[in-house]
Image: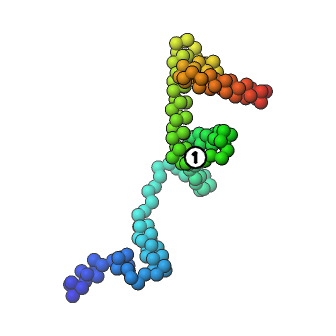
Amino acid sequence: KISALVASCVQPSRPHWSAMAGKTTGEDIKKYRKGKKQMKVGKAAKQSKRPKAPGGTEKKRKKARVENYNMYIYKVLKQVHPECRISKNGMAIMNSFMNDIFDRVATESTRLLRTMSRKTLSGREISTSVRLLLPGELAKHAVSEGTKAVNKYCENST
């Protein structure tokens, strides 16, 4: 009697996944999974220290937006080579490259500001830092495209 009592206490109320092998159907699996979810729900919810807003409705927290250059890289790729595509891994590498270049230009331009004892960052410091960072022809093209973009922005904003 005691061994039967111990065996009934030790054995789970639902059969284990391996015990159901050979005779399982889709319904059995759904019932098993549903039972597992119900068994996990036993913990009581932790009370928050912050008082609830009047009205009783809680606002859902928004996901933090991750800033990246994916859209811009894709647009430029389609302008230059409309027939080409880019993989997720390639996009991640390009995004990392853009973050790195941005960081270098920002660091160099703030260094220029400190040496000139100024406090305002302008397009002039950015173009100078680009000339210092990028090699030869690439720097010339980058500066010309940057000035073109700034001029276009100034035209549209007024």
Image position, residue 117 (x, y; %): 55, 12
Quickly name the residue at label 1.
86
Q: Nearer the viewer, residue 73 or 150?
A: 73
> From the image, which quarter does the C terminus lie in?
top right
Q: Residue at x 55, y 52 (%)?
A: 52
* Residue 109 visible in image: no
Q: How many numbered markers are drawn? A: 1
Image position, residue 154 (x, y; %): 74, 26
Quarter where residue 105 is shown? top right
Q: Residue at x 63, y 18 (%)?
A: 124
Q: In the rendered view, would you say 106 is above or below 47?
A: above
* Residue 135 visible in image: yes
Q: Amino acid at mark 1?
A: Ile
Give the residue at the far top of this rendering: 116
Q: In the rendered view, would you say 128 is above or below 29?
A: above
Q: Nearer the viewer, residue 139 or 66?
A: 139
Q: Residues within 10 Å of mark 1 (few under 14, many from 20)?
A: few
> From the image, which quarter does the N terminus lie in?
bottom left
Quarter where residue 22 is shown? bottom left
Give the residue at the far left of this rendering: 2
Image position, residue 123 (x, y; %): 64, 21
Q: Residue at x 58, y 14 (%)?
A: 118
Left or right, 144 with reference to 4? right
Q: Nearer the viewer, residue 95 or 54?
A: 95
Label 1 sits on a secondary structure element that is loop
Q: Residue at x 45, y 77 (%)?
A: 29
Give the residue at the far bottom of this rendering: 1
